[in-house]
């Protein structure tokens, strides 16, 4: 019980100290760039409602797709500890082949060309 109480007390003290420091440490002097609506350092030149490029959207979707692929394949090294690792690796290879074929298709269609 004494160890549990000590750990809880240390955790509470650490949380209070970190919360206090996070309120007092940052510099609270707003300047012109921080007060601007875009915080990018330059004034907007046109309307914010203009449609953006469809190619940009396609590249963003492809990035998310391949980022998700990497996230799904990260636990793959632990797949050899299963009862049948061949099944796990064959499914992973199937996913990789499917995504590679999709990448080749997008490349051949010109979907990865940023400028026309």
Image: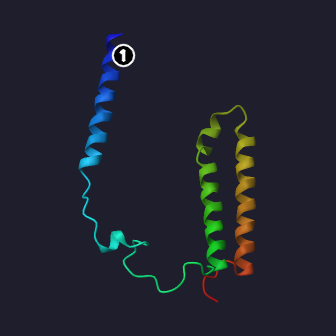
Q: How is the image coloured?
A: rainbow
- Count neighbours of disc 1 (C-alpha within 10 A) and say few if under 14, some if 14 to 19, many if 20 or more: few
At 74% from the left and 67% from the top, the residue drawn is 102
On the image, the x and y values in percent for residue 90 come to: 74, 48
What residue is rendered at 66% in x and 72% in y? 58
Q: Quadrant of residue 33?
A: bottom left
Q: Is residue 39 left or right of residue 114?
A: left
The quarter of the image holding the N terminus is: top left
Quadrant position of residue 70: bottom right
Q: Secondary structure at mark 1?
A: helix
Between residue 71 and residue 80, name the one nearer to us.
71
Q: Quadrant of the C terminus?
A: bottom right
Identify the residue at image location x=28%, y=66%.
30
Residue furthest to the top in view is 1
Q: Nearer the viewer, residue 79 or 7?
A: 7
The residue lying toward the viewer, choosing from 27 and 89, is 27
Which residue, as the protein is rendered here, is positioned at the far bottom? Answer: 116
* Left or right, residue 54 beside residue 43: right
- Left or right position of 42 against 89: left
Query: Compared to 95, does 19 lie above or below?
Result: above
Nearest the viewer among 96 and 57 is 57
Relative vertical location of residue 51 with respect to residue 20 in this rendering, above or below: below
Give the image location of residue 79, x and y in percent.
64, 39
Where's residue 101, x and y in %?
75, 66
* Residue that badge 1 annotates: 4
Q: Position of residue 50 (x, y in %)?
A: 60, 81
């Amino acid at each position: 019980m004494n160890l549990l109480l000590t750990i809880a007390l240390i955790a509470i003290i650490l949380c209070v100290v970190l919360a206090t420091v996070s309120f007092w440490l940052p510099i609270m002097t707003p300047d012109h760039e921080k007060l601007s609506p875009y915080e990018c350092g330059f004034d907007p030149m046109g309307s914010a409602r203009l449609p953006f490029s469809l190619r940009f959207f396609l590249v963003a979707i492809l990035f998310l797709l391949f980022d998700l692929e990497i996230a799904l394949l990260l636990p793959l090294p632990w797949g050899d500890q299963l009862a049948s690792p061949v099944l796990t690796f064959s499914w992973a290879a199937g996913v990789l082949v499917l995504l590679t074929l999709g990448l080749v298709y997008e490349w051949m269609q010109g979907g990865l060309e940023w400028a026309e």
